[in-house]
Amino acid sequence: MRNNPVYKREMAVRARSPRIPVLIMLFNGILAAAALLNMYSSIVQVRISNTIRYESFLQLYAFVATLEFLLLMFIMPALTSASISGERERHTLELMFTTRLRAADIVAGKLMSALSQLLVMAFSSFPVLLLTFVYGSMNLKDLALLMFCFVTVALFCGSLGIFASALMRRSTFSNVVTYGTLLAAVAGTYLFNQFLLNVSQMEVNSMILQAGEVRPAPSSGWAAYLLLLNPAATFAELLESQVSGGGGQFTVRYFLGAASGNFITEHWVFVSAAIQLALSAVLLRGAVWFLEPVRRKRK
């Protein structure tokens, strides 16, 4: 990646721009303010009740991690969804193809420059996340899994933005497609499962049971596996296992009910991360195909 001219140029432009330090300052400022307010409320509770509730520090970790995840998930598409379409609008994309640059070099340079910026933001937030380590509530393994989840969602959202930017000629359309697809993957799959779960709940409540029969647990059925495409569901599953011990209403067990005991559900975080990384590779390959100056026509 050091020999990629696109990556070098993007990093040089970002390093000279005041937007990057301002963005990092705002990002960590929001996280620090949220963490300090949460700690202040915990101290106030200690003064009132004279008891220390250590679960409040777990809530601090969950709150800060969730806020950071949401910020990363919405910032990464903004960095990539106009990266190639912006070059096309400035009429500089054609100039790139007059050099020895390949389409893959352009895609990789744009993605890795945005990912590098996101990683700087993620690692710069370590002091805020490490506030919970003072009380012994989390460990380094939990933090490593959290960073793995952050990198996965950054690659997935960034690849989606790169693909839309290569597909669309205008940055406005690219932004709409990127955030629309991300909204469908996050909110669409969850609401669809919630709808099927409510239907199943009504069917279970209307059952007339005989003596000795047990009322079955409601579930959304096969649609629960659509959440494998949902980066927010992956993060929620990880956070529930770290903070609450699993079983929360945002986990896959909540939607699958009694049918939740299988290999996929027991290793949901890694399976969903693998699927999202595979989709990222497909999206990047599609972006390269759309950027090829000469397309081979297949009959």
Image: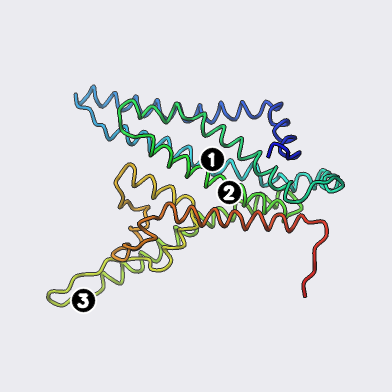
As measured in the structure, the alpha-carbon distance from the residue carrying label 1 to the one carrying label 3 is 48 Å
N-term mark: 3 or 2: 2
Q: Position of residue 5 (x, y in %)?
A: 76, 38
Q: Secondary structure at mark 2?
A: helix
Mark 3 = which residue?
208
Above or below residue 33? Residue 275 is below
Q: Nearer the viewer, residue 114 or 37?
A: 114
Q: Amino acid at mark 1?
A: Leu
Q: Amino acid at mark 2?
A: Cys
Give the class, few, some or many, for how many residues have Cα within 10 Å of label 3's Cα (few <14, many ≥20): few
- Disc 2 + disc 1, Cβ < 8 Å: yes
As measured in the structure, the alpha-carbon distance from the residue carrying label 3 to the one carrying label 2 is 47 Å
Give the class, few, some or many, for how many residues have Cα within 10 Å of label 1's Cα (few <14, many ≥20): many
Q: Amino acid at mark 3?
A: Ile
Mark 2 = which residue?
157
Query: Based on the displayed image, in which of its 4 quarters is residue 9 positioned?
Result: top right
Disc nearest the viewer among 1 and 3? 1
**Left or right for 54, reference 13:** left
Residue visible at 37% across and 59% down? 265
N-term mark: 1 or 3: 1
- Quadrant of the drawing holding the N terminus: top right
Mark 1 = which residue?
72
